[in-house]
Amino acid sequence: MPTILAIGPHPDDVEISMGGSILKFVSLGYDVHIVDLTNGEPTPYGNIETRKKEWERSSNLLGIKSRTVLEFPNRYLMDDIEVRKKVAEMIRKIRPQVLFLPYWVDAHPDHVQTSKIGEASRFYAKLTKSEISGEPFYPTHVFYYFCYHLNVNITPSFILDISSEFERKLDIVRAYQSQFAYDSSRWKYISNMITARNCYYGGLVHVDYGEPFTSHEPIGLKDIRDIV
């Protein structure tokens, strides 16, 4: 059973982008881990204590194996040697076969930097004769989830059916009340946005709801029956 690691810029990005997929992975028996590079603060309605309670509740609802929130600066996250080495250490510790990163194009600089950091850290994690702690390890596959801060339509490499998981995904996203549900109009906007996007991508593959992903490399199938 593969081990999966999703790396996010802030707590909530992984959930809103691929929360349904994580629920599916967990139900299939995969070990799923999340590493957030920042705690996401400051924000207008949040604080560190509130956000910690929110990501702990979300993690419990997702059923993931572990979550680590690193202490790099929100809003000023940069791809540098220090953060690459730290994330490489996390990769060596968790040893995931599958790595999920944010899509490499976005309006939010933290999202773009996280994508670059994840790619570089994957490479760093395999290096021998380095000062990075842990045994060398190289994730076999890297897929990219879509964080939305640009009004663009990205063509995915594949779409995962989350029809059975969608309602639970909404409940999990709502756990981040300080970000998405601090009043009824905010939650209406966020829930409508998620519903519309997941419904759109699901419709492309003839299911109710789907989450899109892309890849730099070709994706192989062992059997044509793997196609929805």
Image: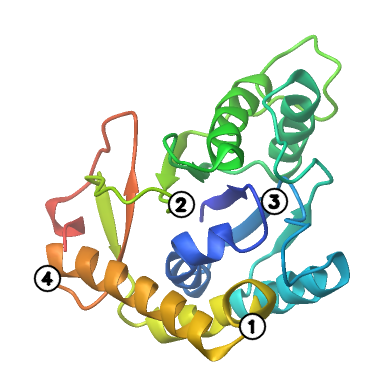
Residue at 55% over, 76% down = 173
N-terminal-most mark, 4 or 3: 3
The one of 225 and 164 positioned closer to us in this rendering: 164
Give the residue at mark 4.
206
Q: Earlier in the sequence, mark 2 or mark 3?
A: 3
Name the residue tied to disc 3: 36
Q: Amino acid at mark 4?
A: His
Label 2 to label 4, Cα distance in Å?
23 Å
Circle 4: element type: loop
Circle 2 sits on which residue?
A: 147
The Cα–Cα distance between marks 4 and 3, rounded to whole angstroms, is 33 Å
Give the camera-side residue of 19 and 188.
188
Disc 2 marks a residue whose amino acid type is Cys
Residue 30 - label: none
Residue depicted at x 74% and y 46%: 74
Q: Amino acid at mark 1?
A: Tyr
Tag in front: 4 or 3:
3
- Give the secondary structure at mark 1: loop
The secondary element bearing badge 3 is classed as strand
Query: Residue 182: which disc?
Result: 1
Q: Nearer the viewer, mark 1 or mark 2?
A: 1
Q: Is residue 162 above or below residue 78?
A: below
Q: Position of residue 214 (x, y in %)?
A: 32, 42
Residue 15 falls left or right of residue 195: right
Residue 3, image x, y percentages: 57, 51
Measure the alpha-carbon separation of dots 2 and 3. Answer: 14 Å
